[in-house]
Image: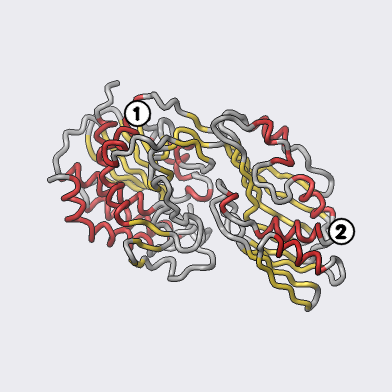
């Protein structure tokens, strides 16, 4: 049976499996180890689905699980994730009830990364059904905390070792040959006059709404409104027990903050413009303001031909007398975390930068056999030989294991609203993913060592 024929025959089942996985609100939680009870349940269900398709399955301590086929000493790994970011506000439908409309499906995770999970399952099912002569083992590894640190894959590597070739369906086609480094920190402000503040859903999402309370008479309200009006940012102001302010932004993935509008930074800059005297607001204005590429912090100096810096403030809270704000930075692929820490050395007695995590960049030569095999799969299925592989700011499982790059699931020019409300997946592209992954597995299987 040809791949296209197989996909059409199985397409309703593909959608049903995706709908099933989307129904699990698999956001990282602490109610049950290691990543929450719902992540345990979605992994159990995914292992059942893989077993039904003829894969030999194993649960690796609920950190992750895998389904395997083929034989041989070499291992091809496909790494996808079952956890999702919080749904947040602004959905037109229930984010955990997948709906189909006008050739798209909608729901949290349909693209990131449950769609890629299902597409990979069916690519393997096709090859199993066709009795493809595997020279290598192929293992679909499903993790449960990609969105909150990838400890799942670190655990997998500790227990099961590395892979020889692989991809993660968690980026863009025709493939990602480089990923920026990551600098994750908490900004802690002491002594701020802000009475209360709360905003954001996740550190790797541009903050789309922030609520704050500041003292009456502490700023020029007309100048505050004029600043936000000039930047076309919506807001609400109430006077009750202080000045209650809500600023509304636009969510986007933290790796592409210029595609969103950060409610936190616009609130702070509007307060600064309105004369709000505050050490935290002044410090923020001097080092970040509305910039998203680290221009005020000296990051233009480390920009390279592959990539630049992106900075996002995703979550902010008042905790006791301190303001705690997440800082998610993706830095250029030819830079080191040591250099970034040197540039970020501008904390002071009132404002701290507490580094939480440092991840070095990932880089592959596009002429290596693995990269060429994956690119050929994309080109042969789509006929597109013009699109180029990219360097991105997003962090994927490729950084957590050897010999792996992000490969799909988004196509060039698509916006599937990943990490935003109304996340979607084009059903024709869903079919195309399966075709590409079938070819990718075949090509990787044929690499001579």
Answer whether residue 33 is visible to the viewer in this image. Answer: no
Q: Residue at x 30, y 28 (%)?
A: 74
What percent of the width, then of the height, locates residue 92?
46, 70
Answer whether residue 131 is visible to the viewer in this image. Answer: yes
Location of the C terminus (image quadrant): top left
The answer to whether residue 271 is left or right of residue 135 is right
The answer to whether residue 122 is left or right of residue 87 is left
Does residue 206 sit above or below 364 in this rendering? below
Q: SS for tag 2?
A: loop
Cβ atoms under marks 2 and 1 closer than 8 Å = no
Q: Mark 2 or mark 1: which comes first in sequence?
A: 2
Q: SS for tag 1?
A: helix
Q: What colour scheme has been applied to the protein in the rendered image?
A: secondary structure
Does residue 274 sit above or below 375 in this rendering? below
Few, some or many residues within 10 Å of mark 2 (<14, 14–19, 20+): some
**Residue 287, image quadrant:** top right
Name the foreground residue: 353 vs 302: 302
Name the foreground residue: 402 vs 409: 409
- Label tally: 2
Q: Which residue is mark 1?
A: 372
Q: Residue at x 22, y 36 (%)?
A: 70
Q: Which residue is mark 2?
A: 277
The answer to whether residue 42 is left or right of residue 394 is left
What percent of the width, then of the height, locates residue 143?
41, 47
What percent of the width, then of the height, locates residue 76?
32, 34
Give me the C-alpha separation between circle 2 and circle 1. 56 Å
Name the foreground residue: 108 vs 144: 108
Q: Residue furthest left?
A: 1
Q: Residue at x 16, y 33 (%)?
A: 133
Q: Residue at x 55, y 46 (%)?
A: 255
């Amino acid at each position: 049976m040809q791949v296209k024929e197989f996909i059409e025959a199985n397409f309703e089942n593909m959608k049903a499996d995706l709908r099933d996985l989307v129904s699990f609100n698999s956001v990282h939680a602490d109610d049950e180890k290691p990543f929450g009870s719902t992540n345990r349940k979605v992994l159990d269900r995914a292992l059942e689905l893989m077993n039904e398709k003829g894969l030999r399955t194993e649960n690796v301590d609920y950190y992750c699980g895998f389904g395997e086929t083929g034989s041989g000493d070499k291992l091809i790994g496909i790494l996808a994730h079952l956890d999702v970011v919080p749904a947040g506000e602004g959905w037109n439908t229930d984010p955990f009830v997948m709906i189909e409309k006008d050739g798209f499906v909608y729901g949290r995770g349909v693209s990131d990364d449950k769609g890629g999970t299902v597409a990979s399952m069916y690519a393997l099912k096709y090859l199993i059904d066709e009795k493809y002569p595997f020279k290598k083992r192929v293992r679909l590894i499903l993790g449960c905390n990609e969105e909150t640190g990838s400890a799942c894959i670190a655990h997998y590597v500790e227990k099961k070792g590395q892979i020889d070739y692989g991809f993660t369906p968690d980026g863009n086609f025709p493939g990602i040959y480089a990923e920026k480094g990551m600098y994750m920190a908490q900004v802690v402000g002491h002594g701020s006059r802000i009475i209360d503040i709360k905003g954001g859903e996740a550190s790797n999402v541009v903050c789309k709404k922030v609520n704050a309370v500041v003292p009456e008479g502490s700023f020029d309200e007309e100048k505050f409104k004029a600043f936000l009006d000039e930047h076309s940012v919506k807001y609400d102001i109430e006077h009750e027990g202080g000045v209650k302010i809500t600023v509304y932004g636009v969510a986007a993935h933290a790796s592409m903050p210029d595609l969103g509008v950060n409610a936190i930074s616009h609130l702070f800059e509007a307060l600064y413009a309105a004369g709000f005297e505050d050490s935290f607001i002044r410090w923020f204005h001097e080092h970040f303001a509305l910039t998203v590429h680290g221009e005020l912090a000296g990051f233009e100096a480390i920009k390279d031909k592959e990539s630049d810096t992106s900075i996002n403030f995703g979550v902010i809270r008042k905790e006791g007398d301190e303001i705690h704000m997440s800082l998610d930075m993706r830095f250029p692929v030819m830079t080191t975390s040591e250099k970034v820490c040197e540039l970020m050395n501008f904390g002071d007695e009132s404002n701290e930068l507490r580094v939480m995590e440092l991840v070095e960049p990932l880089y592959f030569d596009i002429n290596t056999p693995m990269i060429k095999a994956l690119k050929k799969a994309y080109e042969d299925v789509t006929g597109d030989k013009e699109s180029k592989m990219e360097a991105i700011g997003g962090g994927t499982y490729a950084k957590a294991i050897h010999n792996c790059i992000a490969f799909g699931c988004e196509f060039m020019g698509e916006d599937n609203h990943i990490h935003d409300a109304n996340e979607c997946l084009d059903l024709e592209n869903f079919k195309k993913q399966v075709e590409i992954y079938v070819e990718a597995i075949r090509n990787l299987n044929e690499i001579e060592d």
